[in-house]
Amino acid sequence: MPHSSFRVTQRPCTFFDERPNEQDVNLLVVHNISLPAGVFGTEHVDALFTGNIDCAAHPSFTDLEGLKVSAHCFIRRDGQVLQYVPFNKRAWHAGVSEFKGRQRCNDFSIGIELEGTDTTPYTDAQYIALVACTRYIMQLYPDIISSHIVGHCDIAPGRKTDPGEAFDWQKFFKLLSE
């Protein structure tokens, strides 16, 4: 993902498959994740997405045993972007989901995880990296317009709450439009 203001580190991941229609990508989903919850800077998220998580490393990880999840990108607190799944492939990030009457959002969306929690403010470095990443994705997939950039909470209401109240949508869209 070439861009003058940031660089991307490719990470190995096998938790993805082919999209039903590669040309059908028209949604960007913003998530948050931290492992353990509320702890930042660990290698546990990377280990989860690469299939190497040690479920004995923390008591809260027992629920992760055998879990196969991924995102296209993960943005750390310092703005570093890790890419796990090529954009033209289907990452396993949305689960049971619906956008504008369409089910199975993984089929037609790109998922970006921010290192964070619903209630911890995101860093300026994360917003800058997310904007740069979003601009690049919008160039690749012109059907992703501002109204097609949503939170996980918007496509799985009642089941998911991320990126949460701490994510400043107004700030993000202002930066995106500059």
Image (cartoon, rainbow, N blue to C red):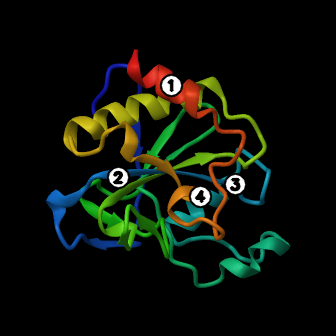
Q: Which residue is mark 4?
A: 153
Q: On the image, numbered disc 2 is attached to which residue?
A: 27
Badge 2 element: strand
Kindly state the secondary structure of the residue where label 3 is placed.
Answer: loop
- The residue under label 1 is 128
* x then y, percent, for residue 72: 40, 55
Mark with earlier residue (3, 2): 2
Q: Nearer the viewer, residue 12 or 33?
A: 33
| In this view, the mark in front (4 or 3) | 4
Q: Nearer the viewer, mark 2 or mark 1?
A: 2
Q: Quadrant of the C terminus?
A: top left
Q: Viewed as shown, does residue 178 lie left or right of 18? A: right
> Which of disc 4 and disc 2 is earlier in sequence?
2
C-alpha gap between disc 3 and disc 2: 23 Å
Taking the image as shown, residue 24 lies to the left or right of residue 15, namely left
Q: Are marks 4 and 1 in contact (CB under 8 Å)?
A: no
Q: Are marks 2 and 4 in contact (CB under 8 Å)?
A: no
Q: Which of the two labelled residues, at mark 2 and mark 1, occupies the earlier sequence position?
A: 2
In front: 101, or 61? 101
Give the number of the disc on residue 34: 3
Q: Earlier in the sequence, mark 4 or mark 1?
A: 1
The earlier-in-sequence mark between 3 and 1 is 3
The amino acid type, in three-letter code, at marker 2 is Leu
For the residues labelled 2 and 1, the Cα–Cα distance comes to 20 Å
Answer yes or no: is residue 14 visible: no
Give neighbour class at mark 1: few <14, some 14-19, many 20+ (Cα, 10 Å).
some
Q: CA distance from mark 4 to mark 1?
A: 22 Å
Which percent across, then down, holds residue 144? 29, 44
- In terms of secondary structure, where does tag 1 sit? helix
Q: Badge 2, how many Cα within 10 Å: few under 14, some, many 20+?
A: many
Q: Nearer the viewer, residue 22 or 48?
A: 22
Q: Residues within 10 Å of mark 3 (few under 14, many from 20)?
A: some
